[in-house]
Image (spheres, helix red, strand yellow):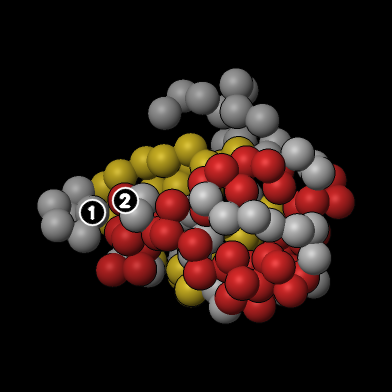
Amino acid sequence: LGLGGLVSESILILTTTGRKSGLKRETPIGYGFDEASNRYYLMAGWHGRTDWYRNALANPDVMIQIGKRKINCRAEKASDEDVAAQMLYALQKEPAALDMWKHIADVDLEPTYESLLKAAPGFPSLWLLPVDA
């Protein structure tokens, strides 16, 4: 997309294959990275009604671009437990995210694992595991 220099370190470009069209689709999206497992985390929100999420579930071989680096990955659905843990971790860095999630989920959330676990189905997420080219 030519946005490498403009995209922050917390945004990657996800390339999926359209589940209906079969065409390549590029989406800028915020991500997390789990260094211990060498995998990337993407949260869909809106109960998974985002095209990039549905495309990745239908065609899990995806590519990401971070800066100028391109990485082939395999998408896997994150468990609700993983989603709650990632949300709790994100709140440590950005407490205001809780208000955004409350608005999106239209539920009252508390900054606890138990509360976030109940909300997790409304924020389906993916792990992206790098694969050899």
Q: Is residue 88 above or below residue 5?
A: below
- Residue 51 visible? The answer is yes
Name the residue at the front extreme: 108
Name the residue type under label 1: Gly
Quarter of the picture holding the N terminus: top left
Residue count near mark 1 (Cα–Cα under 10 Å), binned few <14, some 14–19, many ≥20: some
Residue drawn 64% across the image and 55% down it: 108
Decide which of 4, 101 is in the foreground and name it: 101
The Cα–Cα distance between marks 1 and 2, rounded to whole angstroms, is 8 Å
Judged from the image, the secondary structure of the residue bearing numbered disc 1 is loop
Left or right position of 24 against 79: left
The first of marks 1 and 2 along the sequence is 1
**Corner quadrant of residue 96:** top right
Q: Are marks 1 and 2 in contact (CB under 8 Å)?
A: yes
Residue 78 in the image: state x and y as whole percent.
Answer: 55, 73
Residue 37 in the image: state x and y as whole percent.
Answer: 72, 73
Residue count near mark 2 (Cα–Cα under 10 Å), binned few <14, some 14–19, many ≥20: some
- Residue 38 visible? The answer is no
Name the residue type under label 2: Asp
Residue 35 in the image: state x and y as whole percent.
Answer: 78, 64
Residue 114 in the image: state x and y as whole percent.
Answer: 74, 74
Label of residue 51 in the image: 2
Judged from the image, the secondary structure of the residue bearing numbered disc 2 is helix
Label of residue 18 in the image: 1
Task: Count up the numbered dots.
Answer: 2
Residue drawn 71% across the image and 68% down it: 115
Residue drawn 79% across the image and 51% down it: 91
Q: Is residue 110 above or below residue 74?
A: above
Left or right position of 32 against 130: right
Residue drawn 57% across the image and 55% down it: 107
**Corner quadrant of residue 120:** bottom right
